[in-house]
Image (cartoon, rainbow, N blue to C red):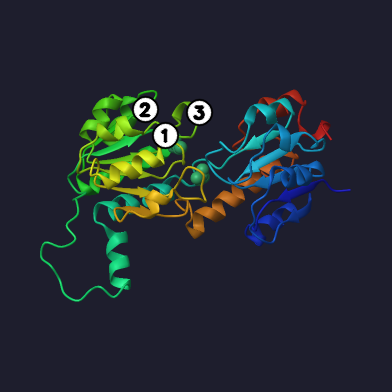
Amino acid sequence: SKPRVWVSRPVFPDIVDRLRDVFDVHAETEERRYSSNEIATRLADADAAIVGLAERIDADALAGARRLRFVANLGVGYNNLDLDALTAAGVGASNTPDVLNETVADYAWALMLAAARRMGEAERWVRDGQWKGSRFEGWLGADVHGKTLGILGMGRIGQAIARRAAGFRSPVIYHNRSRLDPAIEHECGATYVDKATLLARADHLVLVLPFTPANRHVIGEAELKAMKPTATLTNIARGGIVDDAALARALADGTIAAAGLDVFEGEPQVHPALMALPNVVLSPHIASASRDTRRDMASLAVDNVLAAFGQGPHAGRPPTILNPGVLADAGGPSTHA
Ligand code: GLV
Ligand code: GLV
């Protein structure tokens, strides 16, 4: 019989259908949140899985998953996967890098602009029927063009954000664990600085770091205090990189001017203090959610799963596998079943 793939959420049926030649497909038809037990139960009789960022795949989830060989994550960030546990269990895993870079960069600018120009607040005011007349000194926000853009985390997404600054004539400074190649720095028009300089000089700071334990609360009270009171902070990366409680205090007391947040600690819950503030634009983790890019991400996940089972254009070599040693150790996928 065919191997079985579990698709944890509704994903474009025409793309998922590409799995059907090879797999018995068990695709969920509704969005839901799974308990750890529910994930374990579904993985227990799956040979492969396509999961979203809300599905945590850890040692517990894998404990009874004796047939499982591959998990494709629908996202570039994969802090929902315990990669060590997957590797120890001999399960390959993939993410969706690169296909979403430009779309996420667009969204970072959208949120940054919305925060700087107070678009969320203004939109609510119009909808609330409060627009009775105009005040010349009303709705004053911060310019973005010509202002210094700071980027913390300079992978491909950070670079795509930086490249967009040229049209705004905004100088770009960045900090990253490792400095970029000078040719790439030049192409992005970005100047490397230490973290303290980044915080002190950025007029608009964008976070593009992956979530790791070391990156937890990289932006907390002290870092917010080091920023300009006119600055904005935009997070399109991961919740938990920012101390949301500290950010709410900083936005309330004028330590910084505004924030644009697509990700939150403990999402889908949003810190109530953030909810109550006018000067923060909130969105529900949608930075990669353009029609084209979500389709590309789904397609890449499917390609990875097919490849792990020796099928498709990348047979035997899942194009964005995170732990390639697993397939090598198994002596190739076809010998493993
Ligand atoms: C979205 O957050 C992703 O990691 O792709
Ligand atoms: C994304 O997290 C990146 O580093 O580009």
Does residue 124 lie above or below 177 as drawn? Answer: below
Q: Is residue 323 visible?
A: no
Q: Which residue is mark 3?
A: 213
Q: Regarding mark 1 in the picture, which secondary structure is present there? A: loop
Q: Regarding mark 2 in the picture, which secondary structure is present there? A: loop
Q: Residue furthest right?
A: 1
User: What residue lies at 15% left-to-right and 71% top-to-bottom?
Assistant: 134
Is ligand 2 within 8 Å of the beta carbon of the residue shown at mark 1? yes
Q: Which residue is mark 2?
A: 176
Categorize mark 2 by other alpha carbons within 10 Å: few (<14), some (14-19), many (20+). Answer: some
Q: Amino acid at mark 3?
A: Pro
Q: Is residue 301 left or right of residue 105?
A: right
Would you say the residues marked 2 and 1 are in contact, meaning their CB atoms lie under 8 Å apart? yes
Q: Position of residue 73 (x, y in %)?
A: 61, 43
Q: If the image is split into quadrants, where does the C terminus sit?
A: top right
Sequence-earlier tag: 3 or 2: 2
User: What residue lies at 27% left-to-right and 26% top-to-bottom?
Assistant: 196
Residue closest to the eye, 336 or 258: 258
Q: Which residue is mark 1?
A: 155
Q: CA distance from mark 3 to mark 1?
A: 18 Å
Sequence-earlier tag: 2 or 1: 1
Sequence-earlier tag: 3 or 1: 1
Q: CA distance from mark 2 to mark 1?
A: 8 Å
Q: Residue furthest left?
A: 136
